[in-house]
Image (spheres, rainbow, N blue to C red):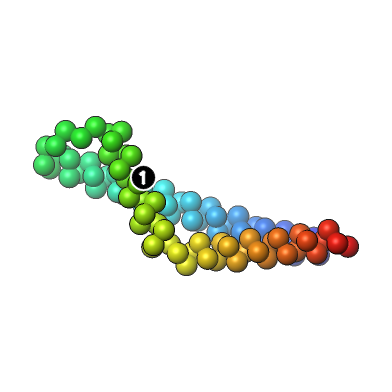
Amino acid sequence: MARINRVARSKLVRLVMYYTAVRLALIAGLAVIIMGINAILELEIPGVLALFGAVLLGFAISAIAFRSLRRRINEEVMVVDEKRRAMRTR
């Protein structure tokens, strides 16, 4: 039973790491786009403000674009919790 629990946990960890990497890549891409627009249009937007805008946009976009990945993570969390409960009742 412990082996199954480790497998489920490792799958969950991989999904969370993938989700985090995808969100960070999205934020980095948005920051580059904002800074590129800033350079092209010569708007003089500070880098911190561009990064803050990228984070805000990234949250909104990832909530929509990565919905299926979040659902898979939630399903894996439920599997790990169920296996943990089963081991405690033994």
Residue 39 in the image, given as x and y percentages of width and height: 15, 39
Q: Which residue matches tag 1?
A: 55
> Which amino acid type is shown beneath numbered disc 1?
Val
Q: Residue at x 32, y 50 (%)?
A: 57
Q: Horizontally, is 6 left or right of 62 in the view?
A: right
Residue 74's quadrant in the figure?
A: bottom right
Q: Quadrant of the N terminus?
A: bottom right
Q: Horizontally, is 24 left or right of 10 in the view?
A: left
- The front one of 73 and 7 is 73
Residue 11 visible here: no
Residue 47 in the image, given as x and y percentages of width and height: 27, 34
Residue 87 visible here: yes
Callout 1: SS: helix
Q: Is residue 89 above or below residue 47?
A: below
Q: Residue at x 82, y 61 (%)?
A: 87
Residue 49's quadrant in the figure?
A: top left
Q: Horizontally, is 51 left or right of 37 in the view?
A: right
